[in-house]
Amino acid sequence: MRIAAYCRVSTEKEEQLDSLSQQKLFFTEYAVKNNHTLVRLYADEGISGKSIKKREQFLRMLGEARNGLFDMVVVKDISRFARNTVDFLNSIRQLKLMGIGVQFLSNNQTSLGDSEFVLTIFSALAQEESANLSKRVKFGKNVNAQKGKVPNIVFGYDQVDKFTLRINPVEADIVKRIYGMYLNGGLGAAKIAEVLTDSTEVRPKKNGRWSQCAVARILQHEIYTGVVTNKKSEVVDFISGKRREFDRTQWLQYERPELVIISKDDYERAQKLRLDRQDLFKNNKERHSNSYLFSTLIRCEHCGYSYRRLYREFKFTSYRKWTCCGRHLKLCDSRVMIDEKELLGQIAEYFRSIVKDKPAFVRAGLAETAAAQSADCDGEPDLAELEKELARLNAAKQKAIDMFTNDVITMEELKQRTAGLKTQIEKLSERIGEIKDGRAQSEYAQSTEERYLNHVYDNISQIIRDGNMTNEALKQVIEKITVNKNGTVKIQLKNFDIDSIGHGIY
């Protein structure tokens, strides 16, 4: 029989991952011992069993079951399959409709052969065990919160124990630097992250990289003023993970002067500046973000606001779409939603069409620049004609001088004849010099433009070659992407006119 095995561990701790490797070994030996063919082993690491939403391997197993990849699913224990009775029964029933049974080895139960009532009892027990565990964890957190528990991981400090932090001098200096750049340097969180990435080897402890979110957390964390805060929220439904936010008056706060890195005055200034910038975005339609693939790249053609990302996750699928912020603020009636994956495909195809012919790409860019310069130069006198006129005036002046030298005219007559010529020659020479300087600058600009176009082309080629479709990479070559109410998407490369790349990408 073709079987698929499913296993799961609920945390990413080393001992749990060791358990996962043992489960994998167990199912391999089980298949050999029972003359089964182990088609695939699905394993979720560090995922809770309370819900199937984030269990990618579990969802993949259900999807591939529809394609007839296997005849039976083997699970070591019901709690490994699901700790949520509703999810458990729904999944079991889906597999049963496809004629696929589920065998739980520890309980010696099968979904096809045994009563669903019995399976429900076992599943309910697993859910109740999870509920009790949630209550114990919640009780422990409340006790620790009342004792003044400190955060487990917070940049700027080293944790001594659950209730004690010690300032990390190196990280504390970076915290001060962040506040300095934000308050005095006029930089936003995204730009500060970029500066820190380029200028320091020190990284945040949580995910090991500087990002807009990492900087924003530091700018909003009150602990840097010496205030430890607990009990901001609590879980009210352990299955869905739904949380209840408490009012600020219900927070548990403790003054810890030994933890002060930033003065309360600077902290309050930072919060005011943050709110002011949020208002500025609403009023001026500007955003400062590089969090996602198209952050600050897509703009509404009608209201001018940036597009924002929407992420929706369903039982067996999810989507990422972009919609106008102006619509969200009730300032725009555009109802267009751009699918991120489809837009990415459109841009990749557009880039591939560009990299087919580098000389043509560069020529097209230079032609646009030349056309713009030509329009600017309309009405400009012909340089050859001006130089010809200058030569005529210089010849007339020289002739007068020769006549004086040969005693044909007097000094007084020479002055009379050359007075007007001198003024005309000076003005004409100045004008010719201006034109030549302008043309020299134009030639230099064209050379610079050509180098820039080659640079843009190389960047696009690199993106296609490496598949490096990131926000930072796209901003190297794309000025903006505009969308109108009809769903027409247009892309503008830096220093290029807008070209349409798609219609109706919903």
Image: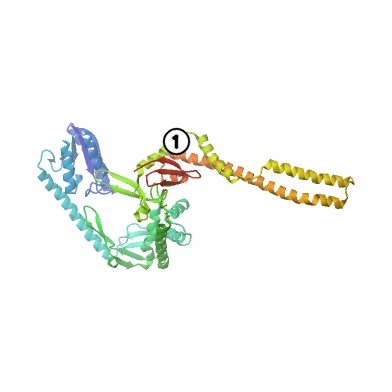
Q: Examine the image and state in which quarter residue 91 appears.
A: top left
The answer to which of 338 and 464 lies nearer the viewer is 338
Q: Which residue is mark 1?
A: 353
Horizontal arrangement in the rendering, residue 195 relative to residue 142 (left or right): right
Q: Examine the image and state in which quarter residue 316 appears.
A: top left
Q: In percent of the image, x 37 and y 55: which residue is there?
A: 331
Q: Examine the image and state in which quarter residue 38 appears.
A: top left
Image label count: 1
Q: Position of residue 343 (x, y in %)?
A: 38, 42
Specify whether residue 313 is in view.
Answer: yes
Q: Position of residue 482 (x, y in %)?
A: 42, 46
* Mark 1, other Cα within 10 Å: few <14 / some 14–19 / many ≥20: few
Q: In percent of the image, x 74 and y 49: which residue is there?
A: 424
Q: In percent of the image, x 35 and y 66: which residue is there?
A: 227
The answer to which of 109 and 317 lies nearer the viewer is 317
Query: Amino acid under label 1?
Result: Ser
Q: Position of residue 395 (x, y in %)?
A: 79, 43
Instruction: Name above or below for residue 418 compared with residue 222.
Output: above
